[in-house]
């Protein structure tokens, strides 16, 4: 098993919150650090939350990690102005990516949008396109750009426009075939899962763009079951070889490694009720 550490920004949103939960439950990760402006309701032994002001975030606020997942995003209505929208969707991700590069984090994953294009006639897509362009120019060791279609799932906040779009896309889903398939709505939980799969098994190249239709099909590779021969399976002497102790795994956040604590104690098995 690998011992990986991850950092997540934008963890209070629809995809970010799903991503944090999946990372904490994943066997590959022993440490998940969230940088957020407010506390999370979700807790886990692997999880550490750092409350920070993104306008004043510094290099020391970002520790080492194998991946930094950026799920920052808002709407113009919620932000209150185009200026504030660009802060959240453009300036903050770019600043965090720059700090991640300085800290030597090898992989930066960022959510943009399906129509991201700096020359788009639509303001939202232009901002996302500018972000992609500047991130590529930053020269990150590995950059994965996640371009989902309309995200669906249970939000803490109600967004009338997105709810209406979600219903329309669900009705039109059977008609979206061929090239139109990429416009299908996608579950935020699937996008979160796809990001982890990309981190662990994705293309090893400087910049990769993942469109929504590809994100929707990503699944964990099948792990072949270990073939244990009958001789070993029923050879109790063989199975009982070695030191007979119990071991507990302890997370050491400072060193990001597993340490073993040996506990000498007997193991008692409860006898099964014969009536069952």
Image: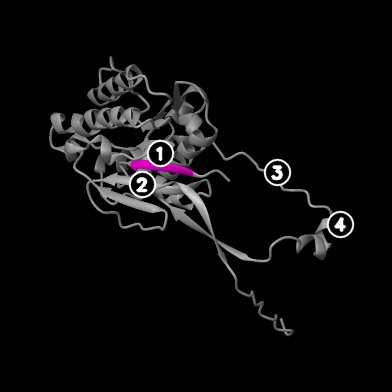
Residue occupying image coordinates x 32% and y 20%: 138
- Of callouts 4 and 3, the N-terminal one: 3
Q: Mark 2 and mark 1: span between their CA atoms?
A: 9 Å
Q: Residues within 10 Å of mark 3 (few under 14, many from 20)?
A: few
Per the image, the residue denoted by label 2 is 33
- Of callouts 4 and 1, the N-terminal one: 1
Q: Position of residue 272 (x, y in %)?
A: 70, 80
> Which structural element holds mark 3?
loop
Q: Quadrant of residue 59?
A: top left
- Of callouts 1 and 3, the N-terminal one: 1
Residue occupying image coordinates x 25% and y 17%: 121
Per the image, the residue denoted by label 1 is 65
Relative to 203, residue 274 above or below: below
Asked if the residue under mark 1 is in contact with the one under mark 2, i.e. CB atoms within 8 Å, the reply is yes
Per the image, the residue denoted by label 3 is 224
Q: Mark 2 and mark 4: span between their CA atoms?
A: 45 Å
Asked if the residue under mark 4 is in contact with the one under mark 2, i.e. CB atoms within 8 Å, the reply is no
Q: Mark 4 and mark 1: span between their CA atoms?
A: 43 Å
- In the image, 123 versus 54, the foreground residue is 54
- Of callouts 2 and 3, the N-terminal one: 2
Q: Is residue 265 left or right of residue 105?
A: right
Does any portion of residue 167 appear in the rendered image?
A: no
Residue 7 belongs to magenta span: yes
- In the image, 179 versus 49, the foreground residue is 49
Q: Mark 2 and mark 3: span between their CA atoms?
A: 31 Å
Q: Could you tell me which quadrant the C terminus lies in?
A: bottom right
> Which structural element holds mark 4?
helix
Q: Position of residue 204 (x, y in %)?
A: 52, 25
Which residues make up the magenta segment? 4-8
Asked if the residue under mark 3 is in contact with the one under mark 4, i.e. CB atoms within 8 Å, the reply is no
Per the image, the residue denoted by label 4 is 231
């Amino acid at each position: 098993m690998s011992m990986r550490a991850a950092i997540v920004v934008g963890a209070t949103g629809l995809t970010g919150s799903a991503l944090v939960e999946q990372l904490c439950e994943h066997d590959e990760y022993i440490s998940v650090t969230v940088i957020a402006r407010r506390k999370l309701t979700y807790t886990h032994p692997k999880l550490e939350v750092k409350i920070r002001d993104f306008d004043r975030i510094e290099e020391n606020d970002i520790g080492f990690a194998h991946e930094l997942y950026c799920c920052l995003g808002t709407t113009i209505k919620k932000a209150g102005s185009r200026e504030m929208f660009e802060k959240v969707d453009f300036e903050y991700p770019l600043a965090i990516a720059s700090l991640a590069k300085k800290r030597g984090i090898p992989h930066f994953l960022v959510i943009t949008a399906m129509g991201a294009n700096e020359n788009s006639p639509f303001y939202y897509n232009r901002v996302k396109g500018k972000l992609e362009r500047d991130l590529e120019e930053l020269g990150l060791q590995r950059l994965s750009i996640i371009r989902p279609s309309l995200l669906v799932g249970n939000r803490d906040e109600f967004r009338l426009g997105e709810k209406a779009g979600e219903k329309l896309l669900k009705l039109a889903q059977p008609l979206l075939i061929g090239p139109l398939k990429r416009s299908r709505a996608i579950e935020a939980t699937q996008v979160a899962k796809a990001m982890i799969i990309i981190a662990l098994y994705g293309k090893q190249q400087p910049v990769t763009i993942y469109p929504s239709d590809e994100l929707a099909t990503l699944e964990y590779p099948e792990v072949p079951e270990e073939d244990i021969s009958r001789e070993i399976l029923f050879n109790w002497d063989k199975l009982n070889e070695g030191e007979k102790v119990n071991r507990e795994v302890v997370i050491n956040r400072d060193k990001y490694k597993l340490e073993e604590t040996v506990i000498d104690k007997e193991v008692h098995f409860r006898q099964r009720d014969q009536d069952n």
